[in-house]
Image (cartoon, helix red, strand yellow):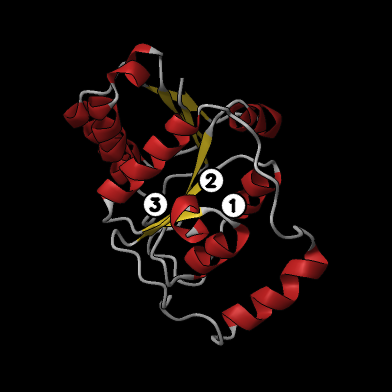
């Protein structure tokens, strides 16, 4: 089973529609994953307009049986959802200078993480540094490939965190990044526009 989790608030530019569309593509290509009970689980608050847009995206994709909306959960329960997932989604669309704290949580827990954000944004740059897969919000095909890669791995193993997740390690890098020294488009050329574990290993 491929368990995908998103725990967080849906507001501003944060939109799960690209993940829903990619999940549909993945399940169409891997009916064995659908038969195994693969799920996209959502926990957290959502602004009314965002909740409606998400429901419409799920209905359009025909994934009502593969999506679970858990609503707001206490922190311990939300982390439990994350810990039992094989992939964690972090949304940071249209947030050039913001890095969601949940990125550090999932990476530190050793769970494969997908950052949906512009690759040249602060979240995109930091996600790449931390070893997460980073996909542009428009790259539905790239997101589907990340899902396929996690499914094919099959082990559900935890990934060792490639860098220290401590204030002392992160603060100087964030200072440099947010001052604009590193906030620029990535020069790495990936044909899909999606930076993932497989591509970075080449």
Name above or below for residue 5 compared with residue 68: below
Q: On the picture, is 138 further left or further right than 85? A: left
Residue that appears at 64% across and 30% down: 83
Question: What residue does disc 1 label?
Answer: 103
Give neighbour class at mark 2: few <14, some 14-19, many 20+ (Cα, 10 Å). many
Closer to the camera in the image, 111 or 148: 148
Name above or below for residue 156 compared with residue 199: above
Q: Secondary structure at mark 2?
A: strand
Question: What residue does disc 3 label?
Answer: 14
Q: CA distance from mark 2 to mark 3?
A: 16 Å
On the image, the x and y values in percent for residue 148 come to 37, 36
Q: Secondary structure at mark 1?
A: helix
Q: Which mark is residue 113?
A: 2
Closer to the camera in the image, 101 or 145: 145
Residue that appears at 66% across and 36% down: 158
First along the sequence among labels 2 and 3: 3
Q: CA distance from mark 2 to mark 1?
A: 8 Å
């Amino acid at each position: 089973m491929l368990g995908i989790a998103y725990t967080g608030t849906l507001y501003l530019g944060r939109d799960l529609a690209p993940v829903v569309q990619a999940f549909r593509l993945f399940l169409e290509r891997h009916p064995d994953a659908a038969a195994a009970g693969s799920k996209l689980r959502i926990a957290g608050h959502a602004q009314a307009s965002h909740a409606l847009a998400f429901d419409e995206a799920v209905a359009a994709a025909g994934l009502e049986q593969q999506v679970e909306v858990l609503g707001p959960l206490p922190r311990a329960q939300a982390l439990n959802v994350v810990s039992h997932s094989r992939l964690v989604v972090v949304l940071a669309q249209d947030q050039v200078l913001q890095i969601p704290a949940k990125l550090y949580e999932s990476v530190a827990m050793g769970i494969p993480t997908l950052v949906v954000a512009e690759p040249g944004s602060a979240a995109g740059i930091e996600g790449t540094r931390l070893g997460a897969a980073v996909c542009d919000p428009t790259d539905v095909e790239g997101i589907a490939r990340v899902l396929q890669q996690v499914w094919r791995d099959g082990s559900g193993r935890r990934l060792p965190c490639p860098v220290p997740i401590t204030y002392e390690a992160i603060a100087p890098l964030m200072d440099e990044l947010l001052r604009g020294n590193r906030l620029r488009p990535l020069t790495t050329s990936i044909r899909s526009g999606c930076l993932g574990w497989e591509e970075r290993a080449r």
